[in-house]
Structures are given as C-alpha cells and as structure tokens.
Image (cartoon, helix red, strand yellow):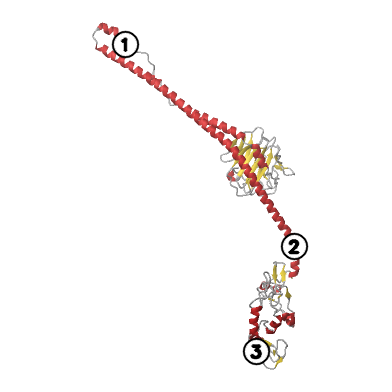
Amino acid sequence: MACANTSWSEENFSCSICLDEFSSPVSTACGHNFCRTCITKFWDEQVQYKCPVCNKLFNTRPDLQVNTFLSELAAQFRTTLRVKEQPCVEPGEVPCDVCTGTQQKAVKSCLVCFTSYCQTHLEPHQRVARLQRHRLVEPMDRLEDRMCKKHDRLLELFCQTEQVCVCLLCTVTDHKSHPVVPLKEEYEVKTAQLGKIETEVLQMIQERKEKIKEMKDTVKLSNKDADREIAHGGQVFTALIGCVEKCRDEFNQTVKEKLKSTVKRAEDLIKELEQQIEDLTNRSSEVKRLSDTEDHLHFLQTFRSLKDPPPTRDWTRVEVHPPSYVVTLRRSLDQLEETLNMEMKKLPDDAELKRVQKYEVDLTLDPDTAHPSLILSEDGKQVHDGGVVKILPYNPKRFTYYTCVLTRQSFSSGRFYFEVQFKFKTTWWLGVAREFIDRKVQAEWTPERGHWTLYYDKDGLVFIDNPSVHLPLRAELQKVGVFVDYDEGLVSFYDVEARVHIYSATGCTFTEPLYPILDPWSNSAPLIISPVNQTD
C-alpha cells in the first residue's frame, strides 16, 4: 500500500523534544523551534538554560513567544497530511507509536524508550548523539511486556533457577543467589531443545493416534463379540424357553391326570356307598315290617333271609387322599436343570478362555511377603513349603500366620490373567487379594475381607465366601487360570487343561490394588506360575 512521501516536510514541522508535530511552537534566539510545553518542561529540569539541539547557553531564561507563522504552517501541514496520507500498516506489521491519526509502519523499536518508530520518527535516534546510544531492534509490539513489573527495567537476563526473565536489578534482589545468563544465551539453549521437544510431541501424537486405532479396533472386535454372544445366548435362551414351556405343559398335564384319577376314585366310592345305603335302607324297611307281623309262619320264613347281613367292606379304612404334586414338580425341575446343564456345556468355553488369555501378565513372587516356611525359586515363578519356619527380620509385608506369598506386581485397573500349575499337589489355595489384608493374624478369606480365592483339597473344590460355594470336583484339574477385570468387578477361574469355566465372582468392588496370591500348603510339591499357551 503506497504511503504519502512527507518526510521532507514533516521533519520541519516536528518538535525535536517530543518528536511530534508542533503544538504552540516557539522559537529560541538560536533559531530552533519547539513546542511551548516541551521547552518549558525541559528548562524546568535544567540548571542552565540551553538549546536542546545546539546546546547554546542563555544567561537568563528566554521569554518565549508563540511563533504564529510557524503555528499556521503546522496547522496547514496537518490538514494537508490528513488528506494525502493513506493507512500504511499491513496486518501483522507493527505500527509506529508516535504517529497521530493514521499510524505508519514501524521500522525499528527502541528498547530504551520502549517505543516503536516509523522512518520519519526514527530520525532523531539517528541524528541526536544521546539517542544514538539507544538499543534499536526490529519492530516488535507489546514492548511493555519487556519491562520488569517490579523495577521498571528492561528484561534482558534469564534466571535458570526459577526459569523466568529478569532485569538487572532482579539479580541483586530476589534472584541474588540464582545463576542468570543473557536472554540470547538461554534462547540458544532452548532453541537447541526445540528439536527434541518437537520429536517428543510428534511421538506423543503418534502414540495417541495408535491408541485411537487400538480403541477403534477394540470397539470393532467388541461389536463382533457382542453379535456372537447374542447369537449364542439367543440359542441357549430359546432352548431354555422351549424346555420351560415343555416342562410346564407336561407338569400341567400330569397334575390334571392325577386330579382326574383322584376324582374318579372318589366318584366310584361314593356310588358304591350310595348303593349300599340304598340296600341297607331297604333291609331296614323289611326289618320294620317283619317286626309288625303276627304271622308266625311268615315271620320265621322271612327272618331266615334277614339274619345274615349283606356283604360289605370296612369303610373306616377307606380314604380318598388329595394328590401330591411335589414329586411331579421336582421331576420337571430336574428335567429343566438337566437341559440347562446341557446348554451350558454347549457354550464356547474354549473361545472364552482364549479371549481372556490375551490379557496374560508376567508375574514373579515377592520374597518380602512370603511366609518364613516357604521356599521360592530363583526366577520367582515357583513356591513350595519347606517344612521349616526360618528366622527372618520383621517385615510388615510378610505373612506370618498363613503360608502365603504375593506377587511383586499389583493391578489397580484394567484386566489381567495368569495361570498356576499344581501337579501332584493335594491341597492349595490361590486367587487374588487386595493390598491391605491381614497378614499377621488369622482372618476369614472372603471377598468381604479382601480375598477372592479357590481352595482345593481331597474333599473338593470351593470358592471361599460367606457362605462358601462348593464346586464340582474335577479329577484331572492340574492348572487353573485366573482372570480379573478390575473395572467391571469380575474374578473368573478356568480349568486350563479342560478349557472350561469353573466359577466367576461378579459384582465385586475393588478399592485397592489387587495382588495375585498363592498358598502351597504343607506338601513339598510346588505351585508354579506357568506361561500361557493358547494352543493347549
């Protein structure tokens, strides 16, 4: 954008003190012109009265009068300039702080005056000796931010202790004992770090993009899993609904048949009783008539047929009992349970186990938590009871009542899975426990007390709870997989060799880090944290 070329005339109409256009211009005896206010303030601060331009001394303070001719010329110049000038500051450029009206583009900024100047208003800094000592830099805005708010001095140093910009006075006050360097030196150091920072930022961006992809893949896989589970669940529930309806119909039919049989028996007995009542009534009538006759021959001939009572049963022992439906209902429920078990066996336990095995974690046992009688392998993967209680230094983490050991690793979110092998062991205890459990005294191993564990001995397999859950004993059980979903509150156990689900504790509330826990009990065979092999 073109600018009005007024530098030749603007200089003649600018005060050498304020560098702005004249306001009530006055002239000195040496021929120089100044704003009345500017020269008056200048002389008020001086001991001697001299010209600010040529330094000519005056014996007495001159009596200044307004130069009306110059004042009129300055006014005419301002009017002409406002007509001719066009805006010369493009977006992103720094405007001159001295220009009035339309601002020109600054060409330099003074770090002493804290002012940005266009080419015209920069002229005194190029001509006047004391202004030539000022530090000029490329134009920059917000120069006030470069001043120390406390000392009103230029921020030209950097405190490496507090990582802030400081002025020279700050180095002898608040930052007296701190190492400080020039801004340029620290700028070069920080600039050298930008490459590393940029690399780190790009790496963080890439990591987050990969995490987004991972989450999207998880959502996609979850949708497929959900569709598959809905299909499997639909088949199971359809079969169960069909079984329930069939059992209901059979139960209703059996109850109706029993009721029909009972009603028929009662009706038959009632009919027989009514017949006998009728026969007995007739006999009673004959007895009465016979008792009224005086015909000896007739009496004796008739009495002969009455002396033997008609055959009849002992009705005191004859009863009609209401039918019992308990056995019928139990038989229907047993059939329903059998169908449910059959459908449960059809569930894809193998696929479920493969899904949870993907959350395998690498575990090692923590010797600081091991009961003094336990012996751990060098790799921290095996533990067995040595039969002798060792004398060990006190450790608040160590179990001293139960022969237990925790892993070094704990988990406070997400999912994790591990497998424990116990071949040749007759008794064991394993699962997960929260961090702050009783380690020195006897306590119940229940979820309420922070334990989610399976217990195994010759009498069976039990999930310890209140009350405990007795599970079907698996003769070939040699390896158990434990899966935990911390956020969902789920702890599941699997028979790894048979690849079937054993038991799940749902709706658990976890408020502390969880640790895998093992208790090998008394025989010398070890419990072994074994690597997961999904091809088993």
Residue 178 or residue 269, whichever sits in front: 269
Question: Regarding mark 1 in the picture, which secondary structure is present there?
Answer: helix
Q: Is the C-beta separation of discs 1 and 2 under 8 Å?
A: no
* Disc 3 packing (10 Å; few <14; some 14–19; many ≥20): few
**For the residue marked with disc 2, what is the amino acid?**
Gln
Upstream in sequence: badge 1 or badge 2: 2
Say which quadrant the N terminus sits in. Answer: bottom right
**For the residue marked with disc 3, what is the amino acid?**
Phe
Residue 366 position within the rendered picture, expressed as x and y whole percent measured from the top left: 70, 46
Side of 432 where 279 appears, left or right: left
Residue 193 numbered mark, or none? 2
Side of 297 where 248 appears, left or right: right
* Disc 1 packing (10 Å; few <14; some 14–19; many ≥20): some
Residue 99 position within the rendered picture, expressed as x and y whole percent measured from the top left: 66, 78
- Relative to 21, is 270 above or below? above
Upstream in sequence: badge 3 or badge 1: 3
**Label 2, label 3: how far apart the Cα atoms are:** 62 Å
Q: Nearer the viewer, mark 2 or mark 3?
A: 3
- Relative to 274, is 525 above or below? below
At x 48%, y 27%, the residue is 253
- Residue tagged 1: 306
**For the residue marked with disc 1, what is the amino acid?**
Leu
- Relative to 109, is 33 above or below? below
Upstream in sequence: badge 2 or badge 3: 3
Residue 314 position within the rendered picture, expressed as x and y whole percent measured from the top left: 39, 18
Residue 422 or residue 335, whichever sits in front: 335
Question: Regarding mark 3 in the picture, which secondary structure is present there?
Answer: helix
> Which image quadrant for residue 221?
top right
Q: Is residue 40 visible to us here?
A: no
Question: Regarding mark 2 in the picture, which secondary structure is present there?
Answer: helix
- Residue tagged 3: 69
